[in-house]
Amino acid sequence: MFDRLPEYPWEQLKPYAEKARAHSGGLVDLSVGSPVDPTPEIIRAALEAASNSPGYPSTGGSPEFKAAVVEWFARRRQVSGLTPANVMPSIGSKELISFLPLLLGLGKGDVVVQPKVAYTAYIVGAALVDAEIVSEDDPSLWPANTKLIWINSPGNPDGRVLDVDRMKAAVERARELGAVLASDECYAELGWDDWSNKLIPSVLDPRVCGGDYTNILALYSLSKQSNMAGHRAAFAAGDAALVKSLVNIRMHAGLNTPAPVQHAIAVALGDYEHVAREKEIYRARREILLPAVKAFGFEVTDSEAGLYIWATLREDCWTTVARMAELGILVAPGSLYGESSLKHVRFALTATDERITEGARRLENALGLNHR
């Protein structure tokens, strides 16, 4: 059973990281989407205020936490029909993503569908229960024995946004199959281009699901918008019966989100100002890095939202990774994200302003261009 999962993907990058680190100007690490900016003071104060928490936290979420999630979905996601029974906390979104097939009782012979370009955790969950993974974006091609469907908008790594019509098609097909539809929406506050000033749709939006949450779950995280990756601050919302079942299993397993973190989530969701400030920080970094990536010769695809630039030089992704390492820049190879991504790489915007600027300078200087 211990060989169900391959070596952790980022281990493959270690030789390239060493090569990039040897650059005279040091390493510009654009490979991992881990926040580097400070956790906002309002959140740190909330954590401190709730730090005296000697008792066990509620697995299903405190009343304050649940009310904050319901209110946030109404205000920021255009979802007004939720009640406290529809929401639950999780210990980061990746934990729930990776264990959802197990919590749902899936096993051998069942199919888990993921996007063609997919975040690495979906396949982990399928492997843990020995289910089959199918990478397919076209709902009409999802197999009859599908039990769990993952959609991801905005996408990681590609930054693709699913509009209402595409999400609605996924919901309708999931209902035909009797499958659970789980929507990973963790970058929804970070839209660019056409989505810069519009709210990105949720699978719980009544235009998508008709106000019926049966067998639907939306997952969210504050790791990026609130710089809380280190606090494992996340939650899910959707089908009340499904939430109740998941909470029951998690109570048995002792999977509890700490009470101070639940309080901090409630405070963070009620304060949009810090989110708007962080978005502008990432916008500025994107406006420095994106032109340099294009100037180098990359074709940028999707990248409409989120914290990544998804790009290709139309060559094997590992050749591109090696090419970037020569410049002291570390990027993530598309091969980590599925067979459809073998010629792409992912540039992360989660580096300091100085490192982003230095990475852009190196890309432009490689072509003899002056940095803007």
Image (cartoon, rainbow, N blue to C red):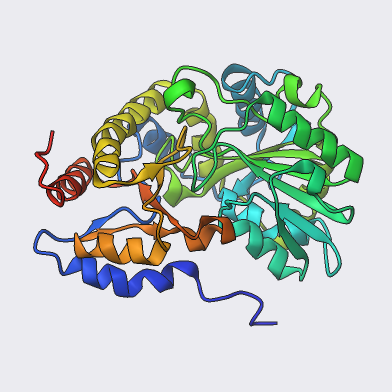
- Residue 292's quadrant in the figure? top left
Residue shown at the point (57%, 43%) measured from the top left: 234
Q: Is residue 303 above or below residue 194?
A: below
Q: Is residue 141 above or below residue 329?
A: above
The quadrant of the image that shows the N terminus is bottom right
Residue 204 visible in rendering: no
Residue shown at the point (82%, 36%) measured from the top left: 240
Q: Nearer the viewer, residue 364 or 54?
A: 364
Q: Is residue 9 above or below residue 256?
A: below
Of all residues shown, which one is farthest toward the bottom? 2
Residue shown at the point (83%, 39%) measured from the top left: 173
Of all residues shown, which one is farthest toward the front? 314
Q: Position of residue 347 (x, y in %)?
A: 36, 49
- Residue 67's quadrant in the figure? top right
The quadrant of the image that shows the C terminus is top left
293 left or right, relative to 346 = left
Q: Nearer the viewer, residue 202 or 58?
A: 202
Q: Position of residue 220 (x, y in %)?
A: 59, 39
- Residue 287's quadrant in the figure? top left
121 left or right, relative to 271 = right
Q: Position of residue 224 (x, y in %)?
A: 43, 40
Q: Nearer the viewer, residue 224 or 56?
A: 224
